[in-house]
Amino acid sequence: MPFFVFLFLVLVSVSPNLTFSIVADHATPTRKLGSSSSSSSLCPLDIDGFRKIIHESNLRLVFLDVQTECHYMFQAIRLLHSQYLQTTGYFFPPPAASDACWVAYEGLVDELLPGFRVRSTCGFKDSLMWESCLNITTRSQFEKLISQSDLQKIWSSCNQSLSNSSFCSSCLDSLSTVSESYFRGVNDGNASDCTGYPSIYAAAVANPYGPTNFDTAKCLFSIDLFPTHKKKKKHVVFRAVVTGSVCGFIGAIGVVWIFWRRHRKMKKKNMVENEMGFTPKRDFIGGNTKLFKLTFQEIKKSTNNFSRENIIGMGGYGNVYRGILPDGSEVAFKRFKNCSVAADKTFAHEVEVIASIRHVNLVALRGYCTETVPLEGHQRIIVCDLVHNRSLYDHLFGSGAEKKKLSWPTRQKIALVIEFKGVNTLLLTDWAWSLVKQGKVLDIIDGGMPELGLQDEMEKYVLAALVSAHPIVQARPTMDQIVKILEANFPVPPIPDRPFSLLESIADTEQSIGFNNLNYFPSPEPFICNSDHPILDQYGNGRRLK
């Protein structure tokens, strides 16, 4: 960087946090700077601020030819004018301060480069410091001269950091257009600076960082202000980028290696499974029965990533999801919980056996999935045909669209073939028993059930259900006895009171209940049934049960 360039850079830099650094072939002697002169105090340009920056910087300069140095000094004067415009709204200091500014400016140059006279060496006239062009002295006068469209171009292209070369070129193009359109042919040489108006205005007004900003000064005034701390920062950033790139590259190689190992391991596992007979797709017993194996990603896509909206069942072993296969068929996916790879072979064998069975009361098994998924663990899923009529639970206890009223004949058929879980049935027996004790047997029956059966028949089913769910196991009839009660019109045995004494012997219990002889069913004591249940309107309120 030229010596004069550096000098002007220092002069231009008003901000105390900026320092200038120039690589030099030889070091200039360090001078002890005195206090501000009287000329500096009379000049509105902040020469003392530049002197302070030079004093704190300890800079070294490289002297180039006179023409180059004079060019940089001329640009530095423009930068000083831009700073003055930014703080006062005027392009130039008043004429009365011209001599003081020149004396202060040349004095600072002489401190750094003894014997160099700026005005005499470069041919600058005294009026260059203060004389205006086209009588434009203020910001408002400049903005009145320039059209709104051209001003808008300056603002849009220069109102940003000019560190990027494309941004800088865009800003310079708009300034060149304004200079050619409004100041061409009116330049007074070294007496005034007409062509410098656009750059001075853009740096002071349009650019948000100001004329002393490193990137702004370099772009608009060709002055390369290079702060020492910015150098260090660039070195730190460079080291950080290099270190981060190396670490990222090594990390990427590690990730690729891990995935390659995992892929190789899975490929080897699939080969072993194929050798043992576990193929992704194969035929089973029954020529038309095919069991296929799906991937976890295919199932996620079919269930919309296991959306809660697609859940159609929940249980202790996992959830059931509704899904659509690529062929458009609707299926149900049973996703099991807490699975491990160890039991996959047994699971696959059981799936094969179930898929080979065909029964009217069994849902057809379509396929399955066993796969270990990152972050989600080992997955085990079976695929079945979707039953649109839903479950018995939905019909009995569902709400809204899920609940459909089952008629009494339908419930009769279901009761004769279904297997109830004791844990679910016993939950309601206390409530039902309290109604029976009050003589309100028919209150137990669903009031919204269509096609009610005969009252005697319905009461028999209620009492049979109660005695079958009795807390004392010995009080419950056998399945053979229940069939005779429901189908052969055998009477319901008497129901022991609850709770039943656990101290009685099993023989006494069986004798009191009368279950020792399958063909003998003692008649229960008659009791009166009084109820306000809605269905009693069909039979009359209150009757004697026999």
Image: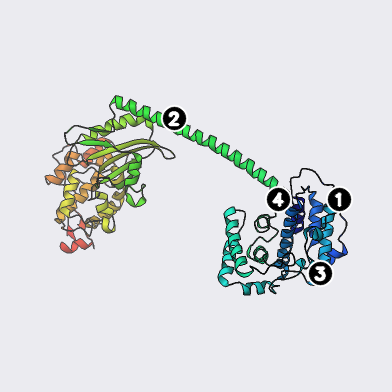
Q: Residues within 10 Å of mark 4 (few under 14, many from 20)?
A: some
Hey, what amino acid is under mark 3?
Ala
Above or below residue 91? Residue 520 is above
Q: CA distance from mark 2 to mark 3?
A: 79 Å
In x, y percent, where is residue 201? 66, 66
Query: How much space separates mark 1 and mark 3, taking CA atoms?
Result: 27 Å
Residue underneath mark 3: 97
Marks 2/4: CA–CA distance? 51 Å
Disc 3 or disc 4, which is closer to the eye?
3
Q: Judge by depth and name the residue closer to the eye, 101 or 393.
A: 101
x and y percentages locating residue 322 in the rendered image: 29, 48
Q: Nearer the viewer, mark 1 or mark 3?
A: 3
Q: Is residue 329 left or right of residue 180?
A: left
Q: Earlier in the sequence, mark 2 or mark 1?
A: 1
The residue to which callout 2 is attached is 261
Q: Tag 2, which secondary structure?
A: helix
